[in-house]
Image: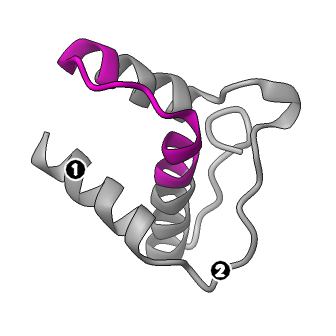
Amino acid sequence: MDKLKDLAGKASGSSSGGGEQKPAAGGQEDYLDKGLAAGEKQFGIPENKGMNEKITDQGRDMFEKQTGKDIPDKVSN
């Protein structure tokens, strides 16, 4: 849970120079957004879709930077 809070703090406190943040296409959530929302619901944390999108985008960008592999849009857009 502390890692989730740390990631949320980093996502809101710093802007990545990696480009623009894209909203979910057509209002549809990808699997990472749904998983984060389910985790928030499980722990009783109020859901904030805008913040969740930033968190999952930051996580995806970090993964792609570290591994050099792309995540399919179905998992994270």
Q: Quadrant of residue 36?
A: top left
Q: Which residue is mark 2?
A: 18
Q: Position of residue 46 (x, y in %)?
A: 35, 25
- What type of secondary structure mainly makes up the magenta span? helix
Q: Is residue 24 left or right of residue 66?
A: right
Instruction: Check the image and report above or below for 25 versus 53.
Output: above
Q: Which residue is mark 1?
A: 5
Point out the stretch of residues depicted in magenta.
Answer: 40-56
Q: Is residue 24 left or right of residue 7?
A: right
Residues packed near mark 2 inside 10 Å, few (<14), some (14 to 19) or many (20 plus): few
In this figure, which colouring scheme has been used for the structure? Answer: one colour
Find numbered disc 2 in the image and state the secondary structure of the residue it sits on: loop
- Image quarter where the C terminus lies is top right
x 34%, y 68%: residue: 10
Q: Amino acid at mark 1?
A: Lys
Q: Position of residue 35 (x, y in %)?
A: 43, 25
The residue lying furthest to the bottom in this view is: 17
Q: Is residue 9 magenta?
A: no
Dot placed on the residue nearer the N-terminal end, 2 or 1: 1
x 38%, y 17%: residue: 38
Nearest the viewer among 30 and 13 is: 13
Q: Position of residue 50 (x, y in %)?
A: 58, 43
Find numbered disc 1 in the image and state the secondary structure of the residue it sits on: helix
The residue lying furthest to the left in this view is: 2
Instruction: Check the image and report above or below for 41 versus 53.
Output: above
Q: Is residue 30 left or right of residue 3?
A: right
Q: Is residue 44 magenta?
A: yes
x 50%, y 62%: residue: 58
